[in-house]
Image (cartoon, rainbow, N blue to C red):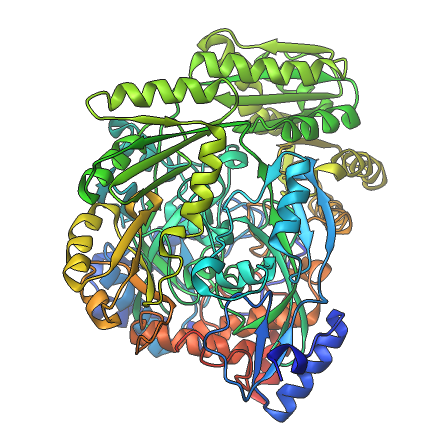
């Protein structure tokens, strides 16, 4: 029997509330599935719950830059709908199917639960910065809401922020309100080959100190990439200015079509497709990236950079302990276990751990929602 | 007589004033603790001046350790703590109670680190919002959130209230520009949340702290995201004879793909007031929009041309483009003096409910009707791109009953904002002002989980008492817990 066959798939917020209330009463652990692109960390003993039937767009108002959508809606469906209005989810939800090995379809609920953000996070902020409001069912089956559908809202505590990136351990989303932004009318990439990590970060730091709204700064296989976006006349102007700044270096220009393909490939980590080793996401100070990748190279494996050097992807045999020791500041998160031992998330200091644990008990007193997923 | 109730102070605490002050002076350099009513006078209220109350004492720490020491003493003695930045809150966010100790961030004035390569600044949180951009200016960077009180307001207050400003259409609000924080908990424990990296890990406690109005802890140091200064900026002024058409123009600009840094709206009441005051030369029409774009001169021309194309399809009364710095200043002059201009007419109460942009015309029409019902004049000046209204209700504080009428009118406007899909407050915070309206926006369960989150950080409810949560709701919540 496959996982799918045993899955509960409530079709409404009310049904979901009843399922969770009962599981709460019986203290039955629940594994929450969006599109099924991340399947690690769930025990086969758990009840499995799918958000597939909690799907569909509630409202989309391009003139207000707001989208209200149910969690089971696929990201590609949303992106197509937004593209028809020349808008997008500007934080570029990461699509890591190629490396996570799941055969599902990414859903917006999964993206919010993981606070997944792609290369443009550098300029526009993460998924959590584009989440305006949530409806969810907590671990007792209560139907709750927080935030709203407007872009500025400071009414009460901002629970959307803690829901985003909580991997379903606080509640099951039933509706998310996302801020949408105009898609760039024009785009281009400058590719600077033959650069070490340290040299690439230098280029990034210079480029990101300009007012040219760099919308991506990544490095892989010795080439640094700068993505330029804007209105039709902004892009050639910005490109020219940047090329003049780096005129002593070799620079290739990649056109709009090539740019779209390149950044999709960077965002999906094509370069790690087909690998099986543990995959880690390291959040660091960009100027530390050179020294850190030197240590990673000594451990073996491969790495690439995004977010101007602030994000290092590492695929290799280095252990969590070794990686965390290699970081002067920041943290290491295990994205694909690949046989690695130890915690996926960097263990927080004791007081923060205590507060986080108490928060989880507040939202989910019986600890039934994806239990232990964030301390696995 | 005002209508917002504050709980009666704890007489037992008032009786122990000398003991508490002595304990604070023992834990901190004595000159950092003031308790003489003549000296604490300035701390009796914030910018919501209709409400005031002398605190038990005021502590003015200079370091995180001193804040922690003060918190530890208050915690040990069971004394409520009111965190305070510059006291510019329009919502009574820093209103003391007679049995509370104010912990002020004003002397936390250090600029700790500027790192343009990694694009952050680390500061103590008593520095003012505008001074942060001032520090960054020689480096070619700035700090984006720009609340209108930015000359006076502190980063601590900005974080507590998740402040916005005129430019957040493009740059977001405080929470989008805050990378890390040092937080002193009610127990005096100190935690670091986030940091100089681009993503926190684990539950996003930083996101929870930001905008929590001093309910969860006191932020003493902050890591702020910094941005390179734009090459230039230029406003245009567009006048329309109808609020609906002006609203349509805003929506069309947003849909076009141009993201202005600001879209400001002024109605005829405000336009008349600023004309009488500063003679900005605004057209006399129902709605004046100021739209500002950024970039190189050529980029600005291009964006303004796109905006003009849109505006012209809707037959504006006037489309005025600033051709130089002086003309740009002239366009902004009226908007920037709008509050002062309204203040010349009478006392005013400023609200900041936010509505979906498509609901702006309807909301404005309803506010006009409510104005007649309540018999008080209202002017509207607001951030239109994000629907963040700022109705200014005119009243006379010296006329008995006028404040109460203004508050009743204000409450009706905020209910209207929620009814059309918006919220009570877009950037000022709930404070005491909107506390009892929280039940309009949230169900008992919605409020209950927020209060349970407060329990986690502040189990004894010592921090910033009688703010954010309706007194009845919090009393019920706490007595249910005690059972």
Quarter of the image holding residue B242? top right
Q: Is residue B96 visible?
A: no
In the figure, B397 relative to A17: above or below? above
> In the picture provided, is A296 more to the left or to the right than B432?
left
In the figure, B396 relative to B401: above or below? above
Quarter of the image holding residue B431? bottom right
Could you tell me which residue is drawn at 35 percent across and 70 percent down? A345
> In the picture provided, is B228 more to the left or to the right than B337?
left
Quadrant into which the C terminus of chain B falls: bottom right
Residue sitting at the far bottom: A26
Q: Nearer the viewer, residue B306 or B6?
A: B306
Q: Nearer the viewer, residue A286 or B481?
A: A286
> In the picture provided, is B384 more to the left or to the right than A329?
right
Could you tell me which residue is drawn at 28 percent across and 66 percent down? B68
Could you tell me which residue is drawn at 62 percent across and 73 percent down? B448
Q: Nearer the viewer, residue A315 or B343?
A: A315
Q: Where's residue B230, x and y in %? A: 39, 24
In the figure, B322 relative to B85: above or below? above
In the figure, A233 relative to B261: above or below? above
Could you tell me which residue is drawn at 24 percent across and 54 percent down? B62
Q: Is residue A123 visible?
A: yes
Residue sitting at the far top: B323
Q: Where's residue A230, x and y in %? A: 49, 27
Q: Where's residue A122, x and y in %? A: 39, 43
Q: Where's residue B440, x and y in %? A: 73, 59
> In the picture provided, is B302 more to the left or to the right than B79?
right
Q: Nearer the viewer, residue B289 or B200?
A: B200
């Amino acid at each position: 029997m496959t996982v799918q066959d045993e899955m509960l798939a409530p079709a409404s917020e009310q049904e979901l509330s009843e399922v969770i209330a009962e599981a709460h009463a019986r203290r039955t652990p629940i594994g929450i599935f969006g599109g099924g692109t991340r399947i690690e960390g769930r025990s086969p003993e758990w009840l499995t719950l799918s958000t597939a039937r909690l799907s569909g767009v509630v409202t989309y108002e391009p003139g207000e830059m707001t989208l209200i959508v149910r969690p089971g809606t696929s990201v590609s469906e949303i992106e197509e709908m937004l593209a028809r209005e020349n808008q997008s989810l500007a934080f570029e939800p990461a699509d890591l199917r190629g490396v996570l090995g799941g055969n599902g379809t990414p859903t917006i609920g999964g993206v919010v639960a993981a606070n997944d953000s792609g290369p443009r996070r550098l300029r526009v902020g993460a998924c959590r910065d584009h989440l305006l409001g949530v409806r969810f069912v907590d671990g007792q089956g209560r139907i709750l809401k927080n935030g709203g559908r407007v872009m500025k809202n400071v009414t009460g505590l901002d629970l959307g922020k803690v829901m985003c990136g909580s991997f379903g351990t606080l509640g099951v989303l039933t509706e998310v309100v996302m801020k949408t932004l105009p898609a760039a009318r024009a785009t281009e990439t400058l590719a600077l080959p033959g650069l070490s990590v340290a040299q690439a970060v230098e280029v990034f730091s210079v480029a990101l100190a300009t007012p040219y709204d760099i919308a991506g700064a990544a490095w892989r296989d010795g080439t640094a990439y700068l993505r330029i976006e804007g209105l039709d006349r902004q892009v050639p102007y910005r490109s020219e200015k940047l090329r003049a700044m780096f005129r002593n270096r070799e620079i290739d220009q990649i056109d709009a079509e090539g740019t779209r393909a390149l950044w999709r490939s960077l965002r999906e980590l094509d370069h790690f497709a087909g690998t099986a080793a543990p995959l880690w996401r390291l959040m660091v100070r960009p100027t530390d990236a050179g020294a850190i990748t030197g240590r990673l190279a000594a451990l073996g494996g491969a790495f690439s950079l995004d977010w101007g050097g602030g994000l290092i992807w590492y695929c290799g045999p280095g252990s969590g302990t070794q990686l965390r020791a290699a970081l002067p500041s920041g943290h290491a998160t295990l994205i694909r276990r690949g046989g690695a031992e130890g915690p996926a998330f960097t263990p927080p200091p004791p007081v923060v751990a205590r507060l986080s644990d108490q928060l989880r008990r507040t939202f989910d007193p019986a600890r039934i929602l994806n239990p232990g997923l964030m301390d696995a | 007589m005002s209508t917002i109730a504050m709980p009666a102070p704890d007489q037992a605490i008032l009786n122990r004033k000398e003991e508490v002050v002595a304990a604070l002076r023992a834990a901190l350099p004595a000159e950092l603790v003031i308790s003489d009513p003549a000296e604490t006078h300035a701390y009796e209220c914030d910018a919501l001046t209709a409400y005031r109350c002398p605190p038990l004492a005021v502590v003015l720490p200079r370091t995180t350790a001193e804040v922690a020491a003060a918190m530890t003493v208050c915690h040990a003695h069971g004394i409520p703590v009111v965190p305070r930045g510059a006291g510019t809150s329009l919502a009574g966010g820093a209103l003391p109670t007679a049995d509370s100790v104010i912990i002020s961030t004003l002397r936390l004035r250090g600029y700790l680190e500027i790192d343009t390569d990694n694009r952050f600044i680390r500061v103590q949180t008593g520095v003012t919002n505008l001074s942060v951009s001032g520090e960054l200016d020689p480096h070619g960077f700035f700090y984006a959130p720009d609340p209108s009180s930015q000359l006076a307001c502190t980063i601590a207050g900005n974080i507590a209230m998740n402040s916005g400003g005129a430019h957040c259409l493009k740059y977001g609000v405080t929470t989008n520009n805050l990378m890390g924080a040092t937080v002193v908990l009610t127990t005096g424990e100190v935690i670091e949340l986030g940091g100089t990296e681009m993503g926190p890990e684990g539950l996003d406690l930083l996101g929870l702290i930001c905008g929590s109005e001093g309910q969860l802890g006191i932020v003493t140091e902050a890591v702020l995201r910094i941005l390179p200064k734009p090459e230039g900026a230029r406003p245009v002024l567009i006048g329309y004879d109808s609020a609906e058409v002006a609203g349509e123009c805003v929506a069309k600009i947003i849909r076009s793909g141009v993201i202005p840094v600001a879209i400001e709206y002024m109605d005829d009441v405000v336009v008349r007031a600023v004309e009488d005051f500063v003679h900005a030369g605004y057209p006399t029409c129902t709605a004046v929009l100021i739209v500002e774009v950024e970039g190189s001169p050529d980029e600005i021309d291009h964006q303004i041309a796109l905006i003009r194309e849109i505006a012209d399809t809707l037959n504006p009364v006037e489309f005025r483009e600033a051709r130089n710095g002086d003309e740009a200043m002239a366009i902004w002059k009226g908007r920037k003096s709008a509050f002062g201009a309204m203040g010349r007419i009478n006392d005013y109460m400023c609200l900041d409910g936010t509505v979906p942009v498509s609901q702006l015309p309807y909301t404005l029409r309803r506010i006009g009707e409510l104005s007649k019902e309540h018999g008080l004049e209202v002017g509207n000046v607001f951030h239109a791109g994000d629907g963040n209204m700022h109705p200014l209700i005119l009243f006379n504080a010296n006329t008995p009953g006028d404040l109460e009428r203004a508050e009743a009118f204000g409450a009706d406007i905020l209910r209207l904002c929620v009814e059309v899909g918006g919220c009570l407050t877009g950037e000022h915070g709930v404070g005491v002002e909107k506390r009892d309206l929280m039940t309009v926006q949230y169900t008992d369960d919605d409020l209950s989980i927020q209060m349970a989150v407060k329990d986690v950080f502040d189990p004894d409810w010592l921090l910033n008492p009688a703010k954010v949560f309706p007194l009845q709701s919090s009393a019920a919540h706490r007595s249910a817990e005690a059972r």
